[in-house]
Amino acid sequence: MVSIVKEKRITTAVASWLFACVLISAGPCRAERAPAHAVASAHPLATQAGVEILERGGNAFDAAIAVSAALGVVEPFSSGFGGGGFWLIHRSDDGKQVMIDGRETAPALAHERMYRDAQDNVIRDASMKGPLAAGIPGMPAGLVHLAEHYGRLPLRQSLAPAIRYAEQGFKVTSRYHRLAAYMTDTLNQYPAAAGIFLQNGKPPRIGYQVRQEDLARTIEAIAEKGLDGFYRGPIAQRMVREARKHGGIWSLEDLSAYRVVEREPIVASYRGTRIVSAPPPSSGGIVMAQALRMLEQFDLDEMSSVQRKHHIVEAMRRAFRDRAVFLGDPDFVDVPTDRLLDQSYLEGLALTIDAANATPSDILGNGPAPPQAGTQTTHFSVLDKEGNRVAGTLSVNTLFGACFVTQGTGVLFNNEMDDFSVKRLTPNAYGLIGDEANAIAPGKRPLSSMTPTFLETPERIGIVGTPGGSRIISMVLLAALDFADGGLPQSWVSLRRFHHQYQPDQVQFELHGLTEFEQQRLAGLGHELREISRRYGNMQAILWDQAENRVYSASDPRGEGLAVVVE
């Protein structure tokens, strides 16, 4: 049975279970197995794909494959088989926790100056449009890795829903229509992409059926042949040929050399909550851990809303400063993780927070601002009855990635190369600048803000993440604080959002994210404020309350997603 959890309740069976626990032990009682599966994703069809696989005997990892692949079909503006992602996983039988890094890599012919002209000026849109903007995709390899090392079902079975959605099509929603309208001119520059994602060169009408027969055949090839179905053979040859024809630099060697990397997560604590999150080449785990450890030095519960937000902003400011200077692909640069998470260091940073005044970012040093990951990312969360869980964040970077599709494959290319520092201290597409730690190099993975996260106490397990560019980190940070205060997923996904990232030196907040009173008082403390003209983020969250033996699931009200609990 599938039910959308909307309110807190304890069934008779759970009440009886709790009573038995009290008789057996005077201490806290934890369920060893979850009473239900749960799936939360940014699109109802993707959530349904995950539920379908769980009901057919798959585990959370099989469901993660199904959800990831489905999102790659029905949310082409956010993710896809031509993109990449991070899958943070927990395996219940041995407690293994690892992040599967399926981030894109720079082609072998990539170099630091590839998006600059002879005068060393950045070439407009070169890192944003067309195949030259694309890194080597990691999404297909990530799905194969999940199936071979963690899943229970054959890959073909887990990919079946995505193949079906690609063949039969999916209906255009108001969100799809709005985003396609925004990118119509760029999509029309590439006929293969326009032919799939537009309707006669225009944004498809709501209800229009988007079919992707070529992509269905590509997914079938992955289902049958695994890595060889995508990274070698006819599909790889066609992608390389088409990419080079239109100015790209991919090679067959680039594709065949791609490898998924398993990385040890960043682990930190905040007021009794264990935070398990994404390590480099994601900046999310380190930045969030730094901010939380700074905030642990203060009693936020005793503060007014203005003082609480002021301290959170100041902690963000300092953590993002370190992100700008030190973080990059750990396979290419020495990321000083131990130093950045050292308790004494963070206590020292906390001491520099002035309760009565905003700290101008320039005072903290002349490090550059961090490059921002694309805003059009997607996230999903999965829990199965065995206690396995996945937090997956996927991306093609900006809307519809590079807007380029290779004829005959249906694969939409990413434009993640823009997440590198195209030129030191030069703004990228989002007006942000980066440093040498994130400079372009062959085989290197661009720095990301994706922050799939587990929140853990002895009695509660949270699974959470969101899209939103560099604001991903602050959104997950706010959710972690709410988790620590006892909030449920519906609260995490609905929180009003605000953000600071060191540079530009301003508190950004979503539409109605700060009250008029809070704006006035924060401005009085010296903060520059900037209201975003819309609400942002699309958080997907699950909570397993082990004391109650109850599972909750919630999808961000800002999006069109679906969160379900399968009892």
Image (cartoon, helix red, strand yellow):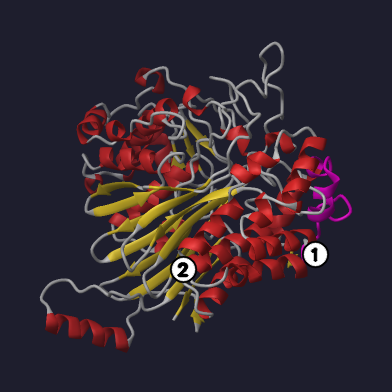
| Residue 193: image location, x then y, percent | 80, 49
Q: Is residue 207 left or right of residue 29?
A: right
Q: Secondary structure at mark 2?
A: helix
**Foreground: disc 1 or disc 2:** 2
Give the amino acid type for the residue marked by disc 2 in the picture.
Ala
Q: Secondary structure at mark 1?
A: loop
Q: Residue at x 21, y 44 (%)?
A: 299
Task: Determine which quarter of the picture holds residue 90.
Answer: bottom left
| Residue 456: image location, x then y, percent | 30, 58
The count of marks equals: 2
Q: In terms of depth relative to the viewer, which is nearer, 52 or 529?
A: 52
Q: CA gap, disc 1 to disc 2? A: 32 Å
- Examine the rendered structure and indicate whether residue 447 appears above or below residue 385: above
| Residue 163: image location, x then y, percent | 69, 67
* Label 1 CA crowd tier, 10 Å (few <14, some 14–19, many 20+): some
Q: Which residue is most to the right?
A: 200
Residue 193: in magenta span: yes
Q: Which mark is residue 208?
A: 1
Q: In terms of depth relative to the viewer, which is nearer, 83 or 487?
A: 83
Res 75 visible:
no
Magenta stretch bounds = 185-210
Q: Residue at x 25, y 88 (%)?
A: 16
Residue 464: in magenta span: no
Q: Residue at x 52, y 57 (%)?
A: 145
Q: Which residue is mark 2?
A: 60
Task: Determine which quarter of the picture holds residue 544.
Answer: bottom left
